[in-house]
Image (tube, rainbow, N blue to C red):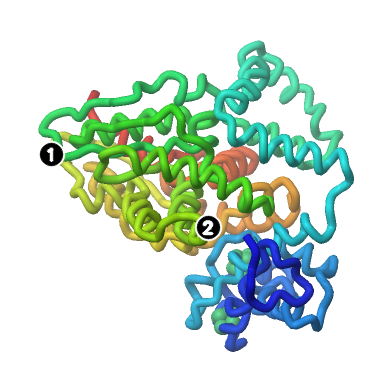
Amino acid sequence: MVNKEKCGNFTEQDAPKYEDTLQCMRCGFCLPTCPTFALTGRERSSPRGRVALARAVAEEKLEFTQAVKEEAYFCLDCRACTTACPSGVKAGEVMEVCRSQVHQQQPLPKWQAGFRSFILEKMLPNPDLLETSMLPARLYQKLGVQWLVRNSKLLKLGPKWIDKAEGMMPEMHQPLRQRIPETTLAKGEKRGTVAFFLGCVMTLMYAEVSKQTVRVLSHQGFDVITPKEQKCCGAPHLTEGDRETTRQMATHNLDLFLDLDVDAIVTDCAGCGSALKEYEEILHERQDHARLELFHGKIKDVSEFLVEAGLRTEDLLPVNKSVTYHEPCHLCHAQGISKQPRDLIKAIPGIEFREMNESSWCCGSAATFSLKFTEESQQILDRKLNNVKNTEADILVTANPGCHLQLAWGLREAGMPQPVLHLMELLGEATPE
Ligand code: SF4
Ligand code: SF4
């Protein structure tokens, strides 16, 4: 999208908005909230420093240098600084936009660019292709090759990110999109109809979790429509600086879901919810404003939706466990949803809720950050694991697949006993068949 404002040394296509860089008054309130500043103590790796870099490029005081490129990707986009900033500066979003500048100004070598474009432009927008691509991973687990690889410790000899990526793989099931009915009817007294947005990572890696989400919604009195033609929300593209493919998929999803007569569009993935709520901004030059507003108003994280609707608790089964909660950045900072997941956990009979210190501090996952910056990601994760340990809770609950992968891996590597459950898995445990 061409930015008609001051671009300076940014290219016009998808440049950060100059006005977004002007709001920073350099107060420093954001500094203690930024994980990368905490790690490095380096001004350029802080929200204030990153916004200053973007402003300098827009004002032609700085070229789009290697340092700007590095900071665009070293930022976790955790948005903790947005929550802290009294001026409404969104340093994470400014850096996210800068990633598309990286690909325009410093293109990758040809083969890497071709691979990137295959993943982002061909595979992710095509659910059938995406699901087929996961078949080898399922066979790898089913045929016992994973057991052999893990026990041989062979991957410890290679780059750390490969060993970590393999270690993070959850138990893979058949993708939920292929087997979930298009409509799941409400149980008991019907309260309404919702559409279910089934994110790529959830359907491919956490199919059994999303199955629980649909079951819980149905048990709570809602017909659940899961359109099979839905596509990826576009969050991976925003993360990788491909804003144009995001727009194409956003347009598809917007048209598809607005055609349905539903009270809400519900998701159980914090990253998807955050991206879907950003369609208003992403598509503002291409779509009618009223349609964008209508769509935005219907998008609900499942915890947000169930608390607004009022959770039916009369037949919930007890779960006699202590539970702590890690807040996904894209739920608490990007969507302002913090209280609702806790309300749901506390509503389950038998649960003893234990608040964790720094519950909204990033876990170090942050899309591909955990594989690109394995050392830094580990340091951020260690801080989180220490906070989990101090609660001595039986179960760690979260609500985003990226956090789930990172935390489950981290707990296992650290020899900690807690299982990680998605909030809907916990609620599913308390929901009778
Ligand atoms: S980004 Fe916000 S909190 Fe940080 S220095 Fe600028 S105005 Fe202050
Ligand atoms: S989004 Fe997170 S990592 Fe990036 S500048 Fe803000 S607080 Fe720091």
Q: Is residue 143 above or below residue 159?
A: above
Residue at the spot x=46%, y=50% of the render? 276
Within 8 Å of ligand 2, the CB of disc 1? no
Residue behind mark 2? 282
Q: Residues within 10 Å of mark 2 (few under 14, many from 20)?
A: many
Q: Residues within 10 Å of mark 1 (few under 14, many from 20)?
A: few
Nearer to me, 135 or 127: 127
Quadrant of image for the C terminus: top left
Tell me the quarter of the picture where residue 118 sits: top right
Residue behind mark 1? 314
Nearer to me, 15 or 208: 15
Residue at the spot x=45%, y=25% of the render? 176
- Ranked by sequence position, the earlier of labels 2 and 1 is 2
Is label 1 in a helix, a strand or a loop?
loop
Is label 2 in a helix, a strand or a loop?
helix
Q: Tell me if 67 is positioned left or right of 205 in this view.
A: right
Q: Tell me if 265 is positioned left or right of 270 in this view.
A: left
Q: Position of residue 205 (x, y in %)?
A: 54, 31
Q: Is residue 209 above or below residue 10?
A: above
Residue at the spot x=42%, y=32% of the render? 209
Q: Amino acid at mark 2?
A: Ile
Q: Position of residue 19 (x, y in %)?
A: 59, 79
Tell me the quarter of the picture where residue 113 sits: top right
Tell me the quarter of the picture where residue 122 sits: top right
Q: Amino acid at mark 1?
A: Glu
Residue 385's disc number = none
Quadrant of image for the N terminus: bottom right
Tell me which image quadrant ligand 1 sits in.
bottom right
Within 8 Å of ligand 2, the CB of disc 2? no
Tag in front: 2 or 1: 2
Residue at the spot x=51%, y=56% of the render? 286
Q: Position of residue 293 (x, y in %)?
A: 36, 58
